[in-house]
Amino acid sequence: MDGKLALSVPEMAKALGIGIENAYDLCKRADFPAIRIRGRIIIPADGLKNWLSGETVKPHE
C-alpha cells in the first residue's frame, strides 16, 4: 500500500482488486475500518490490513 497512512476508497478498491461499488459497500459495514471526515471516506492502511487478517477464511480442521 505504498507506505501511505490511509487510502481513499478508489485506492482501496484498486489495492484489493475490487470494483468501486463493492469498495463503497465495504465502507458501509460496521466492522470495516472506514473513517468519515467532512464527507470524505478514508481507510487507515493498518486498519485495513488488520480487517483483512480477521476476514481470512480458515480451512476446516
Image (spheres, rainbow, N blue to C red):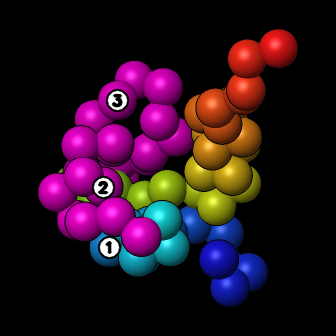
Could you tell me which residue is drawn at 32 percent across and 73 percent down? Answer: 10
The alpha-carbon separation of the residues under discs 1 and 2 comes to 8 Å
**Mark closer to the chain start, 1 or 2:** 1
Q: Based on the displayed image, in which of its 4 quarters is residue 55 positioned?
A: top right
In this picture, residue 40 sits left or right of residue 51: left
Q: Mark 2 and mark 3 in contact (Cβ < 8 Å)?
A: no
* Residue type, label 3: Arg
Residue in front for this viewpoint, 59 or 31: 59
Q: In which quadrant will I find the C terminus? A: top right
Q: Which residue is mark 1?
A: 10
Q: Mark 1 and mark 3 in contact (Cβ < 8 Å)?
A: no
* Residue type, label 1: Pro
Residue 33 placement (x, y as % from top left): 52, 40
Could you tell me which residue is drawn at 47 percent across and 35 percent down? Answer: 32
Specify the segment rendered in magenta.
17-38
Q: Which mark is residue 23?
A: 2
Q: Secondary structure at mark 3?
A: loop
